Image (cartoon, grey):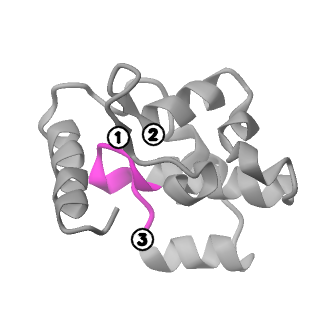
Amino acid sequence: MLIVARGRKPVEPQPNNMILAEWVMERWVQGAILEASDPRLGGDFEVEEMELVLMLGLLCSHSNPVARPSMRQVMQYLNGDATLPKVMADAIGPGMFSVGSSEYNEYLSSFGQLNRKGLL
């Protein structure tokens, strides 16, 4: 979801091996999560929907699998059948992407595999 909302690859070697999820997290911590939306959209989107997609993208990228929502929950949030609970939003925070952790390395590796298969 972050890839679609931002229009960028999940990991870009320049500048400085930018990790999309970390970059979006920084914007969220700064209170400016909408800055993470694709600038080519020119702001032509529903603000609440973009915020939801970005927040869900962060939750789905969480280094702790237990903190990630199930696909059923994701679909309920996207369809408007459920609202993102406050406790889920609180699960997002600085340090959720631990550089050097096995989850982080697995995250990077998975995108390398997708790229080699031509899926990114």
Residue sitting at x 45%, y 39%: 20
Q: Nearer the viewer, mark 2 or mark 1?
A: 1
- Residue carrying label 3: 70
Residue 109: give x, y in percent of width and height.
16, 48
The label on residue 11 is: 1
Q: Amino acid at mark 2?
A: Ala
Q: Nearer the viewer, residue 23 or 57?
A: 23
Q: Amino acid at mark 1?
A: Val
Residue sitting at x 22%, y 43%: 108
Q: CA distance from mark 3 to mark 2?
A: 18 Å
Q: Quadrant of residue 80?
A: bottom right
Question: The C terminus is located in which quarter?
Answer: bottom left
Cβ–Cβ under 8 Å for marks 1 and 3:
no
Residue 52: give x, y in percent of width and height.
69, 56
Q: Nearer the viewer, mark 1 or mark 3?
A: 1
Q: CA distance from mark 1 to mark 3?
A: 24 Å
Give whichever of discs 1 and 3 has the lower sequence position. 1
Cβ–Cβ under 8 Å for marks 2 and 1:
no
Q: Which stretch is magenta?
A: 60-69
Residue 62 part of the magenta segment? yes
The label on residue 21 is: 2
Q: Quadrant of residue 13?
A: top left
Residue sitting at x 56%, y 25%: 26
SS label for mark 2: helix
Q: Where is 60 relative to 94, above or below?
A: below
